[in-house]
């Protein structure tokens, strides 16, 4: 039969276990506002029984472990959506800056195109008037300036985005280094059967932050995790982190390398993904369209100029500087080639009063001179493309934010600390502790009885 | 609306109706978004039906507007004789169009995410077991020649 001492040990195990459970609850309550904290719960198991023939007696309770409550699938979805939010956030921000270049104002390209053709129309009413001729040169200069300014702004924006890529890569390296360190601490604790919940929470939070910067895949393995990029290049393996490097390419922009391999084109999401998308795809596409516009305008106007005669009765020369044959850089370099207003070829037959060529030049306004469209229509298309891309990026960003909010709410309902629940747990553990203490008191009284029985 | 009232309807009156219907569409798209976020399939379906009905209504109103403009029935006043509010209504209509366009872009982005989520769930539910149907039975008693005969018959029946 079990002794009183054994009963005392059993009651003591209850005291110790309930104390541990209460400690877990206290820790949960203390961390109620800690970002990324996952609530913990004590795992109580009954201790191994002892057999005293023919009976089996329980030996109390053991606090086997303290486990953190997490949903790995939910965590994975949060990381994926965080990557999307980082990507569309940076893309939307970049495109909104780009869009500013195309907003309607007195110096924008659309207004400059209209003003240029209006000035030619006025010139056709009195082709010999020098002030009207000067008006054409001024409006042509304004048009060239607006194209130059917009093209240069876009180039400057690409440089700024490039700087952002370099800075973000540096942040990524810091995160991967910290995650590798935490992997080591988690592994050490788990190998000796200790609870590494706090470190796992810290690691999860760092992975969330890393996900907002770059697309990462998390591969769990024994007591540790491996992080890779989208193309499978390792960022963290166990306690080792692999640094990303940036290196300037021939165009002066930085490419991203992982262990000597250029992975720039494989990064699709996260802040870096969105920034690269704006830097390498969206803005160059807009620049290319502006180049087509500038080249188309310059070539068509110069062509009409060459078919007419200036105020001196001489064949017309280029009004705009001829664009490069490939068209690349046309918007940034276009300028007015003549300074003398008399050199505008308004006449179609060499007479000073003739306006035939001025009318032909004005007719370009509605002619399909750029990729089968008139200059105004083509420019409207550019504006539409910029606006459409911006609106899509903003919508994607909003969708990501909504979904992420939902997922975070779900995570909070699973892993977050509920003060009501913790209060109930505290009462439960307190009562169990009191009951164990009462049992000890009773055993003490019984022992006293036994001692008194022997002495009496 | 009776035939007479339609006949007397001005562009102002019609634009007012159009603005009201557009507001209904805005509200319907918003309801659909909430339903989509809650994965309320009945709500999504109901929203889609509402959108279709409202789009048909808008189409019909636009058709009538074209008729009115072609018939020159815009005289600067409403059918009730009030001064025209065409510019204000047009601006309100434009703003409404932009809001609906943005809301639909958002809805589209959410639909892509919902589809992705459902695909993940479907893959999880399907599990890795037996994706290609049951394996052929061992010792099924089918000899090589009889198997060839069976395949030939199947092929011919397919051709037929």
Image: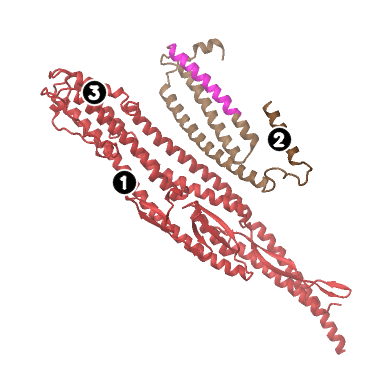
Marks 2 and 1 sit apart, C-alpha to C-alpha, by 68 Å
Is residue A385 rendered magenta in the image? no
Q: In this rendering, which labeled residue sits more in front, label 3 or label 2? A: 2
| Residue A317 vertical position relative to residue A29 in the rendered view, above or below | above
Residue bearing mark 2: B151
How crowded pointer 2 is (Cα within 10 Å; few <14, some 14-19, many 20+) is rated as few
Q: SS class of the residue under badge 2? A: helix
User: Relative to the observer, which residue lies in front, A303 or A204?
Assistant: A303
Which residue is at the far left? A312
Q: Which residues are magenta?
A: B49-71
Image colour assigned to chain A: red
Residue bearing mark 3: A361
Tags 3 and 2 both on a single chain: no
**Position in image of residue A244 (x %, y %):** 43, 58
Tags 2 and 1 both on a single chain: no
| Residue B6 vertical position relative to residue B152 in the rendered view, above or below | above
| Residue A325 vertical position relative to residue A228 in the rendered view, above or below | above
**Chain letter for the brown part:** B
Q: Earlier in the sequence, mark 3 or mark 1?
A: 1
Left or right of A161? Residue A51 is: right
| Residue A349 vertical position relative to residue A207 in the rendered view, above or below | above
**Position in image of residue A162 (x %, y %):** 36, 50
Residue bearing mark 1: A156
Chain hosting mark 1: A
Chain hosting mark 3: A
Chain hosting mark 2: B
The quarter of the image holding the C terminus of chain A is bottom right
**Position in image of residue A342 (x %, y %):** 13, 27
Who's the residue at 36% across and 41% down the image?
A: A284
């Amino acid at each position: 039969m079990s002794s009183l001492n054994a009963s005392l040990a059993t009651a003591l195990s209850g005291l110790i276990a309930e104390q541990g459970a209460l400690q877990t609850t206290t820790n949960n309550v203390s961390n109620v506002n800690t970002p990324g904290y996952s609530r913990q719960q004590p795992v109580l198991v009954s201790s191994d029984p002892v057999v005293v023939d023919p009976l089996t007696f329980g030996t109390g309770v053991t606090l086997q472990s303290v486990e953190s409550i997490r949903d790995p699938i939910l965590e994975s979805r949060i990381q994926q959506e965080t990557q999307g939010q980082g990507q569309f956030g940076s893309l939307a921000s970049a495109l909104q800056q780009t869009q500013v270049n195309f907003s309607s104002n007195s110096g924008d390209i659309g207004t400059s195109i209209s003003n240029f053709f209006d000035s030619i129309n006025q010139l056709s009413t009195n082709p010999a008037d020098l002030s009207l001729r000067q008006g054409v040169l001024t409006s042509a200069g304004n048009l060239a300036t607006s194209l130059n300014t917009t093209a240069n702004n876009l180039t400057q924006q690409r440089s700024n985005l490039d700087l952002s890529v370099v800075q973000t890569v540096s942040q990524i390296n810091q995160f991967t280094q910290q995650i590798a360190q935490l992997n080591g601490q988690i592994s050490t604790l788990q190998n000796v059967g200790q609870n590494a919940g706090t470190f796992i929470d810290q690691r999860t939070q760092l992975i969330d932050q890393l996900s907002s910067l770059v697309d990462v895949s998390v591969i769990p393995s024994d007591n540790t995790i491996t992080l890779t990029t989208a193309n499978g290049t390792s960022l963290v393996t166990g306690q080792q982190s692999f640094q990303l490097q940036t290196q300037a390419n021939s165009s002066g922009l930085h490419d991203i390398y992982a262990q000597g391999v250029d992975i720039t084109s494989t990064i699709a999401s996260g802040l870096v993904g969105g920034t690269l998308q704006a830097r390498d795809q969206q803005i160059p596409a807009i620049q290319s369209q502006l180049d087509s516009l500038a080249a188309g305008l310059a070539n068509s106007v110069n062509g009409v100029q060459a078919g007419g005669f200036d105020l001196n009765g001489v064949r017309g020369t280029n009004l705009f500087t001829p664009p490069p044959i490939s068209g690349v850089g046309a918007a940034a370099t276009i300028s007015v080639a003549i300074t003398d207003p008399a050199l505008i070829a308004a006449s179609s037959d060499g007479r000073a009063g003739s306006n035939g060529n001025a009318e032909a030049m004005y007719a370009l306004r509605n002619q399909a001179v750029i990729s089968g469209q008139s200059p105004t229509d083509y420019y409207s298309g550019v504006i539409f493309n910029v606006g459409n891309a911006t609106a899509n990026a903003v919508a994607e960003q909003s969708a990501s934010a909504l979904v992420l909010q939902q997922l975070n709410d779900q995570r909070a309902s699973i892993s977050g600390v509920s003060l009501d629940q913790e209060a109930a747990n505290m009462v439960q553990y307190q009562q169990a502790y009191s009951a164990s203490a009462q049992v000890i008191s009773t055993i003490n009284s019984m022992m006293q009885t036994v001692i008194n029985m022997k002495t009496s | 609306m009776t035939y007479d009232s339609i006949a007397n309807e001005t562009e102002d009156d019609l634009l007012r109706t159009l603005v009201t219907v557009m507001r209904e569409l805005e509200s319907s798209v918003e309801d659909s978004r909430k339903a989509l976020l809650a994965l309320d399939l009945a709500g999504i379906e109901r929203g889609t039906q509402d959108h279709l009905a409202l789009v048909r209504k808008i189409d019909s109103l636009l058709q009538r507007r074209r008729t009115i403009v072609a018939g020159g029935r815009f005289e600067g006043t409403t059918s009730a004789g009030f001064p025209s509010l065409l510019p204000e209504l047009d601006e309100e209509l434009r703003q409404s169009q932009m809001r609906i366009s943005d809301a639909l872009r958002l809805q589209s982005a959410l639909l892509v995410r919902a589809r992705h989520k459902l695909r993940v769930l479907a893959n999880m539910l399907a599990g890795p077991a037996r994706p290609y149907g049951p394996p052929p039975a061992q010792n099924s008693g089918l000899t090589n020649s009889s198997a060839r005969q069976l395949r030939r018959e199947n092929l011919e029946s397919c051709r037929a």
